[in-house]
Amino acid sequence: MQIRPILAALRHHKAGTLLIALQIALTLAIVCNALFIIHERLTRLSQPSGIDEPNLLVIHNGWAGKPQEGEIASLMASDLDTLRKIPGVADVYATNTYPLNNVGIAYGIGHSPDKLKPVTTTAIYLADENALPTLGLKLIAGRNFRPDEIGQIGLHGDTDPSAIIVTSALAKLLFPDGSAVGKVAYISAKPSTIVGVVERMRTPWVDSSLAKWADCSTLIPYRPLTSASQYVVRVQPGQLENVTRHVRAMLYAANRMRVISPKDGVQTFADIRAIAYNSDRGMAILMSAISTILLIITGAGIVGLTSFWVGQRRKQIGVRRALGATRHDILSYFLTENLLIGVGGVVMGGVLAIALNMWLMKQFEMDKLAPGYVLAGVVTLLLLGQGAVLAPALRASNVPPVEATRSV
Amino acid sequence: MSMLAYYFGLGWRSLRRNPVLTALMVMAIAFGVAASMITWSVFRVVSGNPIPWKSSQLYNVQIDNRGPQYDNAGHEPPEALNYTDAMALLQAHKAPHQTLLYDVALSVMPEGAHDLPINALGYATNADFFTMFDVPFEYGAPWATSDDDAHAAVAIISDDLNQKLFGGANSVGRNVTLDMRTYRIVGVTAHWDPKPRYYDVFNGMTFADRPPQLYVGFNRAIDLHIATSGRNNCGGAPFHADSPEQWLHRECAWIPFWVELPNEAMKKSYESFITAYSAEQQRAGRFQWAPNVRLRNVTEWLDFEKVVPPESRISLFVSVGFFVICLVNTIGLLLAKFMRRSAEIGVRRALGATRREVYAQFLIEAGAVGLVGGVLGLVITIIGMQGVGLLFDQDIAQLAHVDLSLLLTTLTVSILATVVASFYPTWRAAQVQPAWQLKSN
């Protein structure tokens, strides 16, 4: 196939050629960045929280009136008792927060009581001896909290536990050279001994700006004596729906002086996860929709313009056919023409894609675009171009040689 | 006028001649404009100025009470004040109006014995809050400054809470029970929910899904040890407190503080006042660092706090990029369409039509494509708006709504954009030489 005559012909409709190339370039720039955003968001969406989400639900309980801390302790004890007796409930504990909740406490944790030199920041989860079995956390070293270790903490109380349980990621950061169990770390002025290490538990936050320490969680042995707290309930397999439906009414039956929102006072982790990652999922959906429509429109645009060119050149095609060109020659002429425009477009588009990514990186703390995405985009657009041009090109190849003798 | 009708007729016939090409252009414009409008509808709310008539006179105050060792990036002081500093500034009265606030969540006891208690969110604040932020009232008025000084048990409730508790009747002078304490209602606000909630970005209430439901006196709330239900950022400050009083005076940040400074001169003098205050704290030994203070007005504060979610920016940006590609597509297709009619143009020119008339004809034809695309775009926008909840967090998604200005913008943008896109194809069409077209073919 000779390229030279094609280039000569393209020179005659510069505007159309440029427009197609430009459209391919812009589409490539947007589509590969969109694909990249989709991938980034889906990766975040699929990050495991480390807890046994399918069998867990959370109750957000607030005490009405202003019970004293001593009163709250007995109210809470009786609530936990009530919950335990509900058929289908396997285990329960009270806490300040849980993974994906986006609310919580963060402290510095380090090797000295000096708050200024922490090794890292860690999320603080209040827990009792039932927390590990309720959440389904896997203990990989050491032991669980003992019932006699569990303290109580009010709004202004001290969190200076003598025993803590940390995640393996945090243990590794604190003690890279060996087991953390039995060693001392500081989250307050007093030393805390690490009694156990769990495999994995994410911090409550899903925000990517906190991703650096997203696996660094610490469980401390306290029950919350605040007027609002969360009960995390583990159900027996298959009982989630049943328990979720009845648990609110049962707590109200035990004590009316409380607030559990009818809207979101009881949530399964499916709900919690959906809320936590709503905007990530939304971005993935939006970017997929835009990429798809964009590819369709670009494809359709190529079909439209090529059809016009074929219509315009029927006579010339007839002349070529009359001079001995085969149908195949005509077909490959248009395919090659499109390929040339496409290559021009994707070269321009590749540069644009990287420029766009650099701008996005600066503006939105995005990662660097992996070259694979540009490559995938290039292949997609070239194939799209060839596919789009096929129908008009076939129509061109069907122009009979006799067309050369006809006038319009 | 009759020429206009004639051009419309020509345009209509031409558009019907290649229905596929026309449909393609219309769809491209419709999708492009709809994507841009849907993301714009969210962006315009999250990036909006919530109090445009006053935003340059309301200033958020920041004073560094922690020092460089707890440094945030850029030597920024904490985003709110602690109790000691807030009280000192309040008592200094250096600004014509000044307010302070913290989040409270109180349980409200309904009158009926069989009703369940409800949880109400609101603020502990002072009298100036209502005048500074222009809070509208349905009944009553803000409490007086003397009520603040007397630590009075006064409350203002929202129209929504008033509806729940009193069926919407004028409840001024009646009592309300909050966390087992009685407060006298002095006012009921009309619906008031500025977005973003600039005065309480600190507690993450920027796009809170419900307006505040109640307001109680700051001094009274402190007396009753009502704790903040919002953030309490102690940034590594010692945690231990033996009594609520001691806890109150810790170096934590939890009280947003605002002043109203009507002109630049007053701003300057207030800035030097808080600088001098910090210097005094340094001399007294409380601060071991040089004064580090900030005064930011509403728009500067919203910028600094980055209230516009990155998702909103990225999606708007990508959607506009999408629209631009759709327009490039339209330029190409219009070019093809117009040039295909070179013969027709030649005949019209030969029969005496001026270039100007050719321009008019094709611009009108493009405008018609834009109009149809815009109408279809409107439909897609309205449908798409139902899906905004899929794209953004719930509290942000519910801010986006279809209104007349959005509908008009959609139509205007699509028509204008299409007409602009048709400039080049139209110019090419007008260049057609009458003689050439008649001679050849």
Image: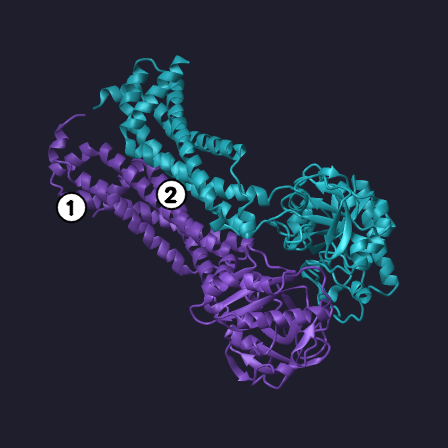
Chain colours: A purple, B cyan
Q: Nearer the viewer, residue A289 or A403?
A: A289
Q: Where residue B229 appears, x then y in whole percent?
A: 69, 58
Q: Is the residue under label 2 in contact with that under label 1 (CB below 8 Å)?
A: no
Q: CA distance from mark 1 to mark 2?
A: 28 Å
Question: Can you say whether B163 is above or below A175 in the image?
Answer: above
Q: Residue at x 29, y 25 (%)?
A: B342
Please say if A59 is above or below A133. above
Residue in view at x 80 percent, y 44 percent: B143
> In the depicted view, which residue is nearer to us: A72 or A121?
A72
Q: Name the disc covering residue A328, or none.
A: 1
Instruction: Using the image as rendered, state which of residue A310 and residue A258 is in the foreground.
Output: A258
Residue found at the far front of this picture: B113
Quarter of the image that includes the C terminus of chain A: top left
| Residue drawn at (36%, 40%) of the image | A18
Q: Secondary structure at mark 2?
A: helix
Chain where mark 2 sits: A
Q: Position of residue B396 (x, y in %)?
A: 56, 48
Residue A57 at what x, y percent from top left? 51, 65
Residue corresponding to mark 2: A23
Q: Quadrant of residue A238?
A: bottom left
Q: Residues within 10 Å of mark 2 (few under 14, many from 20)?
A: many
What kind of residue is marked 1? His
Q: Amino acid at mark 2?
A: Gln
